[in-house]
């Protein structure tokens, strides 16, 4: 029989991750719900999730390739470089904001029945990862247009996805607390996200930057995610072991910090929902 | 077996910090921090509440609006952790609080049964095997494959009630005795609620309906501004409450 004792001290992070694991049935239902609800009302079904990144890529391709005539060093094709950047940043944005929004809005249930809110952050990250994986299909097509194929190392993209799930889950938990605490945090976050996007080499090569700017851009963990992804999937960028270290290190650190902060703050903010 | 305590609440308090400003913004927080001004005040929604509920007992909570009745239900439902004191709840809890929270309008009736039941703490596998029985009881068997945004509000309420009450819990939390759907279903749902209450579970009931409280409960608690003013025999507690209201 399940016993709830409010005086039992929960070990942060470990007990939270354990309860997500114990509720994996619910987690799976939430992921399936996220995916089906998004596609259900559209004729093109699953491909609906690709419309946004593909359209964004088309617009940016026109602006930077045709209007600004930007070229990558060594004559590498611009389109796969751009599309991989847009797909990854979409993964990040979706995982982060959908998870935080779900928790901050109480997900409709958090103030009525006992459900670990962390599950909603995890499900948003996982469904964004699945959307991202679907996006690898058009990316492969685009590579083929330029007579390229994914590298034999492409399964390493799974590691990128795993790190991004940890990263966005941890971040969205902290963001959810900010959303509930401060009414004006949403607009500030949007500005911050836009700045972060420009600080990620989505549509420009790192080599065009001056040494000082390059150092700043390399500090952005998303740069490492993106460089690793581009190299391991389409060989369309150079990444170093250092990028792997930043990616794995920041995602693990953010994951633990996010759960820790959430565990400490959530009991104080839930009454405000 | 009947003396088994399902709920043990000991000296439970729930305090939260209320901002003095109407809105809480980062801007205001920054200004307050610079001015070193305390922008918060402690507010006790519950203070020193203690009670037990054994299997088979129905404990009712009465009091004016804002006395902390719903907060107490949420603390027992594990949604709000108590600031101090201790709450122990043994077994499966069915919170009949705003039924249907967690329903998704885009999902079908069957999908919503599984999702809602899982949110309430049962397993997806268990819920899948119960779809037919629940749909049948709610009289919605023919509507299981359509999204519930096409349901009327009465149909949605019936589905929610049928799913939430599909199994007899160890503890039933009721925020106002429910009346859902049309006359027929209302009788059916009232009968099922009473059947569950008599079926050997513990019940915590919050209600403004003093007649129902008197009839259904074994004990009552009168909450005033978060404090337990009187508790004991329902008739006496109601009397104490009424004499306060009339003065």
Image (cartoon, helix red, strand yellow):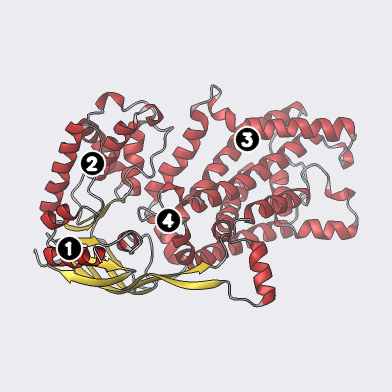
Q: Nearer the viewer, residue A99 or A22?
A: A99
**Is disc 2 on the same chain as disc 3?**
no
Tell me if residue B181 can be seen: yes
User: What is the quadrant of the N terminus of chain A in the image?
Assistant: bottom left
Instruction: Report the Cα–Cα distance between label 3 and label 4.
Output: 27 Å
Q: Position of residue A88 (x, y in %)?
A: 67, 44
Q: Secondary structure at mark 3?
A: helix
Instruction: Report the Cα–Cα distance between label 3 and label 2.
Output: 48 Å
Q: Residue at x 55, y 40 (%)?
A: A130
Q: Secondary structure at mark 4?
A: helix
Q: Which residue is mark 3?
A: A135
Q: Position of residue B74 (x, y in %)?
A: 34, 60
Chain hosting mark 4: A
Q: Which residue is mark 4?
A: A20
Eye-nearest disc, 2 or 1 = 1
Chain hosting mark 2: B
Q: Residues within 10 Å of mark 4 (few under 14, many from 20)?
A: some
Residue A77 located left or right of residue A259: right
Q: Position of residue A157 (x, y in %)?
A: 63, 45
């Amino acid at each position: 029989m399940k016993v709830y004792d409010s005086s039992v001290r929960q070990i942060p992070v470990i007990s939270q991750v354990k309860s997500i694991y114990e509720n994996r049935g619910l987690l799976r239902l939430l992921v399936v719900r996220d995916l089906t609800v998004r596609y259900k009302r559209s004729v093109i079904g699953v491909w609906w999730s690709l419309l946004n990144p593909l359209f964004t890529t088309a617009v940016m391709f026109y602006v930077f390739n045709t209007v600004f005539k930007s070229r990558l060093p060594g004559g590498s094709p611009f389109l796969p470089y751009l599309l991989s950047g847009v797909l990854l940043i979409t993964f990040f944005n979706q995982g982060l904001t959908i998870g935080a929004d779900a928790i901050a809005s109480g997900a409709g249930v958090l103030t009525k029945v006992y459900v670990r809110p962390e599950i909603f952050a995890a499900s948003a990250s996982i469904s964004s990862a699945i959307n991202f994986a679907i996006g690898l299909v058009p990316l492969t097509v685009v590579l083929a247009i330029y007579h390229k194929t994914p590298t034999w190392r492409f399964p390493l993209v799974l590691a990128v996805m795993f790190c991004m799930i940890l990263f966005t889950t941890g971040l969205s938990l902290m963001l959810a607390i900010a959303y509930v605490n401060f009414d004006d945090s949403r607009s500030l976050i949007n500005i911050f996200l836009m700045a972060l996007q420009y600080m990620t080499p989505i549509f420009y090569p790192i080599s065009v930057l001056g040494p000082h700017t390059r150092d700043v851009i390399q500090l952005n963990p998303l740069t490492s995610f993106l460089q690793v992804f581009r190299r391991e999937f389409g060989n369309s960028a150079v990444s170093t072991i250092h990028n792997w270290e930043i990616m794995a290190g920041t995602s693990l650190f953010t994951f633990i910090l996010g759960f820790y902060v959430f565990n400490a703050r959530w009991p104080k903010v839930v009454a405000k929902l | 077996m009947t003396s088994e305590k399902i709920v043990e609440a000991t000296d439970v308090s729930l305090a939260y910090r209320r901002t003095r400003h109407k809105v809480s913004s980062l801007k205001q927080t920054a200004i307050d921090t610079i001015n070193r001004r305390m922008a918060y005040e402690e507010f006790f929604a519950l203070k020193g509440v203690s009670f037990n509920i054994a299997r088979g007992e129905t404990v009712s909570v009465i009091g004016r609006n804002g006395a902390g009745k719903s907060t107490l239900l949420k603390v027992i439902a594990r949604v709000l952790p108590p600031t101090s004191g201790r709450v122990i709840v043994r077994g499966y809890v069915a919170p009949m609080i705003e039924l249907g929270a967690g329903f998704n309008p885009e999902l079908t009736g069957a999908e919503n049964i599984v999702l809602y039941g899982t949110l309430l703490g049962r397993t997806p596998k268990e819920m899948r095997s119960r779809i037919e029985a629940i749909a049948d009881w709610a009289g919605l068997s023919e509507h299981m494959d359509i999204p519930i945004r096409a349901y009327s509000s009465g149909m949605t309420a019936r589905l929610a009630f049928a799913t939430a009450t599909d199994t007899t819990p160890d503890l039933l939390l009721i925020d106002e005795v429910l009346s859902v759907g049309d006359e027929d279903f209302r009788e059916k749902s009232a009968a099922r609620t009473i059947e569950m209450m008599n079926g050997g579970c513990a019940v915590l009931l919050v209600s403004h309906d003093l007649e129902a409280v008197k009839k259904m409960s074994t004990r009552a608690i009168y909450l005033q501004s978060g404090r337990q003013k009187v508790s004991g025999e329902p008739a006496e507690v109601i009397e104490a409450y009424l004499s306060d209201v009339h003065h």
